[in-house]
Amino acid sequence: MSLRDAIDNFYERLVADAIEATREQTDNADYLTDVMCVALNRLPTRYYRHSIDMMFYLADEELKDMKDKSLAAVRAARAFVSEHRRE
């Protein structure tokens, strides 16, 4: 296993969850991938090695704040990607 495979960004999971929560029938995979990239670029990184550590040591209020920021970033990313769609 490489060092890169040993760590993850917690926001990736939160953004993916926010995308699923806001998903519309007309969304396609390319659009959602662009939304995820734009949203993640608007958020800080929060790396972890073991997901259980993140969940155990993260305060409830901090997790709620991270989820709220992820949802806001996804909404803003949807607007940005929709306005800048390639035809």
Image: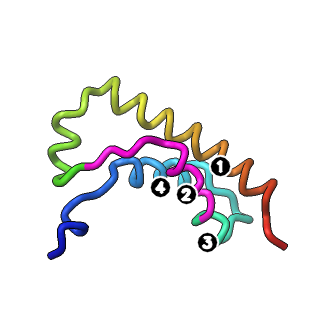
Q: Within 10 angstroms of label 1, few (less than 14), some, or many (20 or more) residues? A: many
* Three-letter code, disc 3: Ala
Instruction: Pick the residue in front: 65 or 8.
Output: 8
First reached walking from the N terminus: tag 2 or tag 3: 3
| Numbered circle sitting on residue 16 | 4
Of mark 2 and mark 4, the one earlier in the sequence is 4
> How many other residues sit within 10 Å of disc 2, few (<14), some (14-19) or many (≥20)?
many
Where's residue 60, x and y in %? 29, 27
**Mark 4: amino acid:** Ala
Q: Which residue is mark 2?
A: 36
- In space, the residues marked 2 and 1 are separated at their CA atoms by 8 Å
Distance from disc 3 to disc 1, alpha carbons, whole Å, reads 15 Å
Q: CA separation, marks 3 and 4?
A: 12 Å
> Is 39 left or right of 57, judged from the image as shown?
right
Q: N-terminal of the two: label 2 or label 1?
A: 2
In front of the other: label 3 or label 1?
1
Magenta segment: 34-47
Instruction: Name the secondary structure under disc 3.
Output: helix
Task: Indicate the amino acid at tag 1.
Answer: Ala
Q: Residue at x 22, y 42 (%)?
A: 54
Q: Earlier in the sequence, mark 3 or mark 1?
A: 3
Q: CA distance from mark 4 to mark 1?
A: 13 Å
Q: How many marks?
A: 4
Q: Mark 3 sits on what residue?
A: 29
Figure check: 85 above or below 56: below
Residue 71: quadrant of the picture: top right
The label shown at residue 77 is: 1
Residue at 62 percent of width and 63 percent of height: 34
Mark 2–mark 4 contact, CB under 8 Å?
yes
